[in-house]
Structures are given as structure tokens and as C-alpha cells.
Amino acid sequence: MSLPTLDTLISYLTIVAAIMGALLAALWLSLIIWAFRDMRARSRDPFAQLLAALLVAALPVVGIVIYFILRPPETLAEAYERALEEEALLQEIEERPHCPGCSRVINDKWLLCPHCHTRLKKACPDCNSLLELQWNLCPYCGNHAVDPYKANVVDTAVPAPNPLPEPEAPEDVEPVGETEL
Ligand SMILES: [Zn+2]
Ligand SMILES: [Zn+2]
């Protein structure tokens, strides 16, 4: 078995180098395509997409590091999702019940607003369920005798203090006896 000649060795090395070169070129190309696609997912600006691809193309290893540092932190889809979430959150805050008197957030189980004392709900005189002020029957127990706006106001209104019995006016003492003759 003879040793390979220098010429065959060189040709083998050339083939290996060519394969390595082709692989590196493929890697370089795919990195350029990846950078372009990634930037397209993060920015609508065609100039920025082109710039990202050019950066990676011009600086094969350093370019991809620079691109990772400088690229926008979130994709367009993520930004859209975040905007949707924020909108939903805002809508939820807006849909929470507000006091008609002071427009502060209230609990829907409150009878009165603790901030401005506005009447918010009324209680059914029969079953004590919370009713809207304008209802004139109770949907829970079927009580038809619920006075709109006024049902069960007494339970929260401060009862008027009983007027003190007026001191009885001293009865006119009829002069008795004097006229008698
Ligand atoms: Zn209020
Ligand atoms: Zn009721």
C-alpha cells in the first residue's frame, strides 16, 4: 500500500475545503434570509428589513450579534396582542359600575355609595334581595308591591327623632266658685 502522492492529497484537501466553503456559504445565506424574515416580523419598514439583511451579509458573525442587540424587542404579532390585552383591560375598567353621583367605582352589592351617599340599589321588603331603583316588582320573590325608587328606604335613612311631647299648656283654670253666687 503506497502513500498518497502530494497531488492526490492536495486534491482531497481541495474537495474538503470546497465542501466546507459551500456549507459556510449556505449558513451565511440562511442567516441573511433569517435576519430579513425576523426583521420583517418585527418592523413594517422595508428599509429596516433590507438593512438587517445587509448587516448580516456584510459582517457574517459580528453582524448577527449586532442585529440581536439592536433588533426591536417584540414582534408585530406580540405588539398587536399586547395592544389587544391593554384594550380589553381598559374596557373592563370602563365597564365596572360607577356611582351616578360621584362616578367612583362601586360594588354592585352596595345599597348606598359610601363616598357621596347616593342611593344605588334598594332592598326588597319581602326577601331582602337587591333591586334596581326603577324596578317596581321583585324578580326574586315576585313581590309586586315594590315601590319604585322608594322601597325600603327606611332601613338606611336616619329616622327622624321623635318630636318631644310638647309640654302641656297649663289648662286655663276656670275661675270656679268666684262667679258662684
Ligand atoms: Zn358616590
Ligand atoms: Zn323580593
Image (spheres, rainbow, N blue to C red):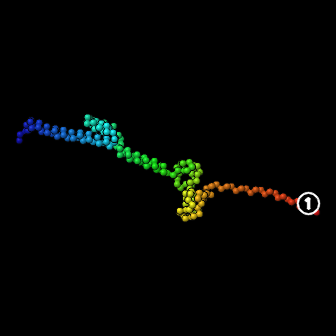
Residue lying farthest to the left in this orientation: 1
Q: Amino acid at mark 1?
A: Glu
Image location of residue 111, percent across then percent down: 57, 55
Q: Is residue 7 left or right of residue 110?
A: left
* Quarter placement of the N terminus: top left
The quarter holding residue 49 reads: top left
Residue at image x 30%, y 36%? 51
The quarter holding residue 36 reads: top left
Image location of residue 147, percent across then percent down: 60, 60
Q: Please determine whether, in this image, residue 17 is positioned above or below residue 129.
A: above
Image location of residue 122, percent across then percent down: 57, 57
Q: Is residue 150 left or right of residue 23?
A: right
Residue lying farthest to the right in this orientation: 181
Residue at image x 68%, y 55%? 161
Residue at image x 49%, y 51%? 96
Q: Please determine whether, in this image, residue 174 is positioned above or below residue 77.
A: below
Q: Is residue 141 left or right of residue 31?
A: right
Question: Is residue 77 in view?
Answer: yes
Q: Please determine whether, in this image, residue 152 is positioned above or below residue 28.
A: below
Q: Give SS at disc 1.
A: loop
Image location of residue 35, percent across then percent down: 28, 40
The residue that mark 1 highlights is: 178
Asked whether 20 or 106 is in front, the reply is 106
Asked whether 17 or 70 is in front, the reply is 70
